[in-house]
Image (cartoon, grey):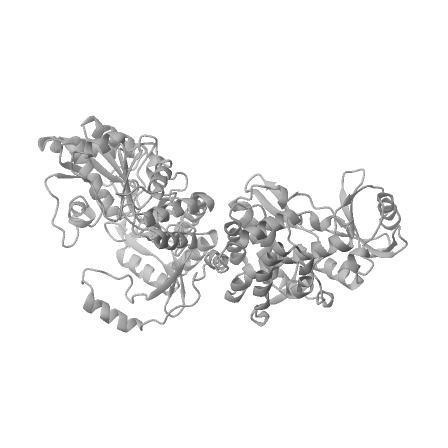
Amino acid sequence: MTTVVQKAPRLTIDGAIRIAAEVYGLQVSATALPSERDQNFLLEISTGEKFVLKIANADEDPQFLDCQNQLIRFLAAAKIDLEFPRIVETIAGADLASVTGDDSRAHSARLLTWVDGACFAAAKPHDRKLLASLGRALGQMDRASANFAHPAARRVFHWDLCNAAEARTSIDLLPDSRRRIIEPFFAAWEKIDWRSLRFSVIHNDANDYNVLVSTDEKSGRRVSAIIDYGDVVYSATVGNLAVALAYVMLDEPDPIQAAAQVVSAYHEQFPLTESEIDVLYTLTVTRLCLSVCIAAQQTRDVPENEYLNISNAQVWSLVEKLQHLPFDWPTRVFRFAAGMPVVSDQPAHTQSDSLLARRKRTLGPSLSVSYKSPLHIVSGSRQFLFDVCGRRYLDCVNNVAHVGHSHPYVVRAVTEQMARLNTNTRYLHELLIEYSERLTATLPEELSVVFLVNSGSEANELALRMARAYTKRNDVIVVDCAYHGNTSAMIDISPYKFDGPGGHGRRAWVHQVTLPDIYRGAHRGEDAGTRYAEAVSDALRPAEVNGGVAAFFCESAVSCGGQIILPAGYLREAFAAVRAAGGICVADEVQTGFGRAGSHFWMFETQGVTPDIVTLGKPIGNGHPLGAVVTTPEIAAAFANGMEYFNTFGGNPVSCAVGLAVLDVIRDEELQQNAREVGGYLKDALNQMKSRHSLIGDVRGQGLFLGIELVRDRQTREPADREAARLIEQMRKRGVLLSTDGPFHNVIKIKPPIVFSRRDADELISQMEIVLD
């Protein structure tokens, strides 16, 4: 490889201008561009049009230059959302020209049109959208390139990851301290089973200077081009992604998380195999090792060539950071990003029929299972669940796995803290304070005191106690069809339960107000919020007979009532009435919080109100038992009446570590923004589907909290409960998990993990179209 660099062209700018005139008939100005073993010039003519003149190495095979040209043309003709250069023919009508350099060597020359854009290295910060656009671009390229062939691509090349052994011979040029860092990475490369990987012609050099970024007024920044095809080679297909990831990770505070964003988007365009995912990190760090070894050799042999030192310091900084990671950690993150089981080796499982029989003998009969033929689920990843046979299901309803099933960052938080300490809140602990501070920072300033519990039911139970302690009253106002938990007191204030099968009916101290449903209810106009809030005012009068209202409990969006979004102004006017009567207002965010609304972090914020108490559960711990009550200092002080409040497990260090991890993931992966974008996209698609299917009476929701109400007649709005039940069974057979809710069990509820993507939305719509047809 040193010989190749030594035979790089040696043309001056005047020489480039001469070639442009003699070979292409262009009068230009010229500027030198960086290159490792070739020579490139930016040319510009008087009209402002720009070109790249590429002078090839004296050792370069003209057939390989033809391969590059043919691949560019091939990709330009494919359906790829990228810009590609146009190959400019010589005056004689040829793609290639033979030219003489200033050193009298013969070289091949090509001219390509200039592609505009900022290089990826300069386009920082690299946010979720930009990283995803790179993944999509690479996936589209590799999907198309799988059908491209050229004999010259099958070459022995020192930048080919399959050929890393060649660069490894230069490891002795590194200082001992640095050699010890990269030796384990090369050792891992030796274990790769290349036979298990797909091979194709790949670009092989999507580094941060070859990836170009443009700004679109509608979609913002995106990867618009991937340039420089001089490293094209027939190799392991996944190597193309690995090369890109090596440069994506440079200077990132969490390099693996940044890489995972690219992996996820790539996988949606061109699904990776398990074998490819399992070697991806090894290949990525191998590229970094190649870079430092080749740079060391070329610095020794060709010190005047500065090309490889552009990112050498950054590469070493990254390698030194990666050496401290457990080697299997990035693979777990990448498997999660691709929606594969995070742990690849699954234990042996009991047959499903036997398991169901044992369940019936052992567990209480009031514990239900989903679907007529229960699913035997053995693992989950991202927005997918996997059954005992390995079949994958798209989970469109599990709002507990808020940031994705088995999210590796959450799992790591649990295991690391459990290995260190788990105890109660009677001891001082940093995580308890840090989590409480981080949680209250997401809420209005008035809500500044935290009580950590183990579930949403516990949170609402505690909120009821606080309300009664503060107001010295007993009565509660609740919304029809609401569900607030499974304790005795919560069943008492949950019409969904006390009015249902086996329910005891409404207690005298509970006052039930109309569900503010603008589709099926009495009020449907612009003033619906005000009209429904009047029912809350009316409920205050019978409460006064019992000594006054203690609290108004309301879900910020009513889930069990049928995915009901409260009409504008409802909470503002209801809260005002309750407070004027001396009661306090509790917002139940157990089903709806933590960014699911998309436009806001908390669903109550969409109503422009601040509750007196907020209760949290379900998504707060991504499956770990955790809940919280957040309230004002005044209410918290009233609750401190001499009786100690103690919760054995509430606020333990493990739960706090989990809660922090969930907040970190929502922030770092920009999942609230994802809920807004994907939720809006899915709601629009559902409304389009509604126009094609009369069975759909209403589509409603906010962010990734959506409902589809099925009716037999749009005029009478007769509930289509049997049809809804049949639809979810048919969707289950098609690998999509949904469920029903609402007072008539005719509402299809959609509240998936908020990593749900547009591709998932398309899959949901596609399968539902088939079932509805």
Does 355 sit above or below residue 167?
Answer: below
Confirm whether residue 354 shows in the render: yes
Q: Position of residue 515 (x, y in %)?
A: 24, 41
Evaluate whether residue 95 shows in this view: no
Foreground of the two, 604 or 670: 670
Q: Residue furthest top?
A: 580
Q: Position of residue 351 (x, y in %)?
A: 31, 73
Question: Residue 417: image x %, image y %?
Answer: 37, 51
Count the labels in the image.
0
As drawn, the residue found furthest toward the right would be 104
Q: Residue at x 73, y 59 (%)?
A: 68
Q: Is residue 661 left or right of residue 194?
A: left
- Horizontal side of 741 relative to 127 (left or right) equals left
Quarter of the image with the C terminus is bottom left
Residue under the image location 13 percent in, 36 percent down: 474
The residue lying at 41 percent from left, 54 percent from top is: 412
Image vertical order of residue 348 relative to residue 144, above or below: below
Residue 171: x, y in percent?
Answer: 67, 60
Quarter placement of the N terminus? bottom right
Name, please, the residue furthest toward the front. 176
> 270 or 332, which lies in front?
332
Residue at horizontal 55 percent and vertical 48 percent from the top? 131
- Residue 275 falls left or right of residue 371: right
Which picture quadrant has residue 193? bottom right
